[in-house]
Image (tube, grey):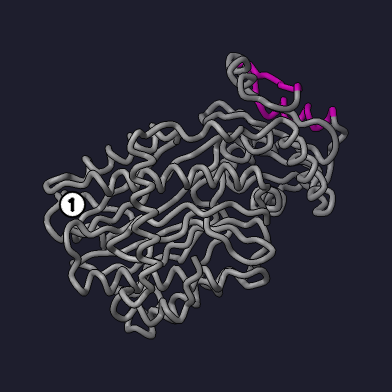
Amino acid sequence: MNITKRSFLKASGATLASLSLTTSALASSSQKTDSKKISELKNITANVTAISPQERLKRIEKAQQLMQSLDVAALIIEPGASMDYFSGIQWWRSERVTALIIPQEGEIAIVCPFFEEPSIRETLAVGEDVRVWQEHESPFDKIKQILTDRNISKGNIAFEHSVRYFVLQGVMALLPTMKDVSAADVVRGCRMYKSHHELTLMHKANEITLNAYAHVWSKLKLGMSQGDVKSLMQNAQAQLGGSGIWNMALFNQASAFPHGTKQKQILTEGSIVLMDCGCSVHGYQSDISRTFVFGEANKYQEKIWNTVRAGQQIAFEKAQIGVEAGHVDDAVRAHYQSLGLGPDYKLPGLSHRTGHGIGMKGHEGINFVHGEKETLKANMCFSNEPGIYIPGKFGVRLEDCLYITNKGPRWFTVPPESLTSPIGKVEKLVNS
């Protein structure tokens, strides 16, 4: 559905009632269809598959090409999304070091505690070189031996940004002829650009979350607590096939706190309900926010909701290939300031960035934030969430994720058009 920026800017000062009846009817029909479809809450992930070993090998190959161009001899990664991205290993961090080593040439290797090796191999998708260390031994000796076996004794060794200091220090103490550098350009150069398969998994995760919202919206009742609403959302996403589920529900004045508060609220007539929720499908995440009004909205609530929706559209239309990511944030703030909001991060207004990168993690680089010089390119993915927060009253946030194609931005989920049809719809995935 194509709605011009001009119509949204006009609507932001008052109401979106001026939008065509066709648009309203379509949104209403979509909501009814979605509600009917998810009433049974069946798993909808059967048609998607996990990332294959062959795909991971291609990722390693790309990383090694980047390492050659950046003069990086080896790359060190600790457990987390990047370790999973390249090797398939799904693990956690503790005082016992587990690490992935990617050399500029040749096979990757893993270092882990001896007693954890069987568990590590359960999710290891590529490579066979697993070096184990006993409790009285140093894992850093094993890392050095891997590098020696691959004829790496000098040059730059890159550490992912989240590698802990004691790990970096332990490795570098044994490599006096090498220099530690950041692995950001290598890791980001791979993970920031999504394949069609990755986009498909993100699309499915967003489909789950949006359908769960439709279910929750249909179940809201007077007197519900925030915990009640979060439980509804948790169960709906789980039954639809999501994993790694997270939910937030804020009512009334609490909705003016972007990431929550300990205030306890219940649903009353006219309550604002701000929700921020997501899940994962085969390791790829969704992130959608919706703001409802329980019962009938007043004119001020409607005005702010419409302003936020206009802000989303401005950000979406600005997110074109070649544009600096920071300019997307600037465009939204300029519009909000023209309406007397802000300036900058001042409240009432938008107190956080307009959006963030997303993929295997809910927050990835780069961001739609003032000053970000990275230009937008095909296959980048972002959230779009220019909320407005009014201390002591309420907040409104609408958040949908988008991906960049050679023909411009595309939604994973199309934002809703009005408070009376506040869900939106799932957009068809296209080739970038």
Instruction: Read off the residue under disc 1.
Output: 263
Q: Is residue 338 visible?
A: yes
Q: Is residue 178 visible?
A: no
Depth check, front residue: 62 or 427? 427
Alpha-carbon neighbours of circle 1 within 10 Å: few (<14), some, or many (≥20)?
A: few
Image quadrant holding the C terminus, namely bottom right
Residue drawn at x 42%, y 80% is 335
Q: Is residue 125 left or right of residue 263?
A: right
Depth check, front residue: 174 or 321? 321
Q: Is residue 331 left or right of residue 246?
A: right
Bounds of the magenta segment: 128-149
Q: Is residue 342 above or below residue 147?
A: below
Residue drawn at x 20%, y 74% is 299
What element does badge 1 sit on?
loop
Residue drawn at x 27%, y 64% is 395
Membership of 108 in magenta stretch = no
Q: Quadrant of residue 323?
A: bottom right
| Residue 26 horizontal/vertical position (percent) | 40, 61
| Residue 88 horizontal/vertical position (percent) | 64, 31
| Residue 209 horizontal/vertical position (percent) | 41, 45
| Residue 159 horizontal/vertical position (percent) | 67, 44
